[in-house]
Amino acid sequence: MAKLSRAEVEHVAELAKLGLTDEEKDRFSEQLSAILEYAEILQRLDTAAIPPTAQVIDLRNVMRPDEVIPSLLLEEALANAPAKMEGYFKVKPILE
Amino acid sequence: MRTADLTVHEARALLSRGKISSTELTEALIQQIESLDGQLKAYLAFTPEIARRRAQEADRRLAQGDQAPLLGVPLAVKDVLCTTDLPTTCGSKILQGFMSPYNATAVEKLYAAGAVVLGKTNCDEFAMGSSTENSAYFTTHNPWDLTRVPGGSSGGSAAAVAAGEALAALGTDTGGSVRQPASFCGIVGLKPTYGRVSRYGLIAFASSLDQVGCLTKDVRDTAIVLGVIAGYDAKDSTSVNIPVADYEQALKSDIQGLRIGVPREYFTEGMQPGVAEAAKEAIRVLEGLGASIEEVSLPHTEYALPTYYLIAPAEASANLARYDGVKYGFSFPNAEDMWDSYRRTRQHGFGPEVKRRIMLGTYALSAGYYDAYYLKAQKARTLIKGDFDQAFARCDVLVGPTSPTVAFKIGEKVDDPLQMYLSDIFTLSLNLAGLCGISVPCGFVEGMPVGLQIFGRAFDEGVILRVAYAYEQATDWHKKRPPIEPLWIGKS
């Protein structure tokens, strides 16, 4: 169950939008399978009645008043952009 | 004594009394870096001109009687913390040249306290690693033995402090990345309680585990730096609104009657010979100082590693989704369409360990596997935290070794990710439970430093600092300096 097939590696890589070479796909298939195999040890734990811990401090719904406060300036936000145009980030076409 | 060997508190005393200027102090550190960093490679961005300007500014403030706690003190900052006037790369090619539009809160606090930042230190890429070998730029070397790693991921900060290339440094700790390098480099490393120090401007790896910490030559310095960076920050919604204690006040050598728990699971088979003995000797010293020692059990310790290596990568896979070549950083030129651009940018911008963890995390969160992996790990996390809650009902602090081995050789573990992960088995649980911990030097094995780890309850930094201080003052380890010498003496 833990062994990650090449097809699964490709599926996960696509979810993460991570391009991989064939060599990487093979190597990750092996390495990740080993790690997941090791993680199987968690299945020994009876956690049916145990709640998950998402975060250790008991903070909930941390809000601030709905007031407009200064934020990043447009120029600051665009300052590191690899490609920009007229105050926008420029990207490659999304649609055909 | 060489200027670079001064502690922060010694430097502050000299600066306040006018015995040395910040300019002189900073110049001495600049010379130290210029003469050593070719061998050590602790710095990714070394900015002497900016440091000199800040030193001059500090001297002006000193002349006016300003007593800010780090005024005039030259420090370094791990390159995962955002700075506006130095680049922030996270040790990755995907952020090469990135100039952050804002400073991390922890950095702002250093500046407000008058610190002179010398530069950004090397780290494993996106803080993912235990040796600093995963930096996309170069590996940092351990000043005690240049053929060995300084630990990771805050290896650059640890090496810099140990070798006198900074009087103190900020690091970050997600699974042990401040404590383990402190242990490998023979210095003090503290991970505060989760929520004690703002994560605003700390480039996120695993949001429920990350904390900014500090690396120093002694415990008093830790108390000073922690006092500066700790505190509630409205810009970090995981920041906790609890007043910051006066940590220097907590430094007493008296630990009479303190209850120290020693978890039996932290003295396992497979530890390097000598490491367990050094930790046990340290525990005897603590007992001699009047603390009561009791063996305890943290029965879910063996589940910490797989728990961490499901939760941290899962959170990382979400946090690193933003590196897509659109807003900042490396962008693959000549992609066919946007998705191709994303795939290729990330393929060429990320190193192998980062890719491994993104893959692992994405898988653990994906449909069909979420319950068996991520959710299961979050439940195991509850059990791990429960172990600590039970132990802390009977003990004030817990102690054990920081790492099962001393610093290993460069290249020894790079090809075996699981072997590399094992060097953090004694540090990971603390991040999962969100508690505070400190590593102090407690001996040597084969000439390499060994660290003793002291864990405390949430927001009990004052207690662990007191135990660390008592131990330190009863021993000499904190006075040892690595034998690294410059290959050439300064500039003529």
Image: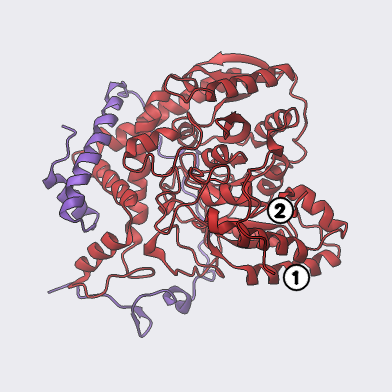
The residue drawn where x is 24% and y is 40% is: A32
The residue drawn where x is 50% and y is 22% is: B273
Quarter where residue B91 is shown: bottom left
Residue A58 visible: yes
Q: Which amino acid does label 1 sit on?
A: Gln
Give the quarter of the figure containing the N terminus of chain A: top left
User: Which of disc 1 and disc 2 is earlier in sequence?
Assistant: 2
Q: Are marks 2 and 1 in contact (CB under 8 Å)?
A: no
Whether residue B398 sits left or right of residue B317 in the image: it is: right
| Labelled disc at residue B4 | 2
Residue B116 visible: no
The residue drawn where x is 20% and y is 67% is: B340
Q: What element carries label 1?
A: helix
Residue nearest the viewer, comparing B32 with B462: B32
Q: Which amino acid does label 2 sit on?
A: Ala
Determine the CA span between mark 2 and mark 1: 19 Å
Q: How crowded is mark 2: few (under 14 residues within 10 Å), some or many (20 or more)?
A: many
Image position of A3 with respect to B93: above or below: above
Q: Residue B300 in the image: x percent, y percent?
A: 41, 22
Which residue matches tag 1?
B56
Whether residue B198 sits left or right of residue B166 in the image: it is: left
Q: Is mark 2 on a helix, strand or loop?
A: helix
Quarter where residue B445 is shown: top right
- Judging from the image, mark 2 belongs to the subunit labelled B
Tell me, by letter, which chain the rendering colours red.
B
Residue nearest the viewer, comparing B197 with B46: B46
Give the quarter of the figure containing the C terminus of chain A: bottom left
Residue nearest the viewer, comparing B155 with B1: B1
Chain A pictured colour: purple
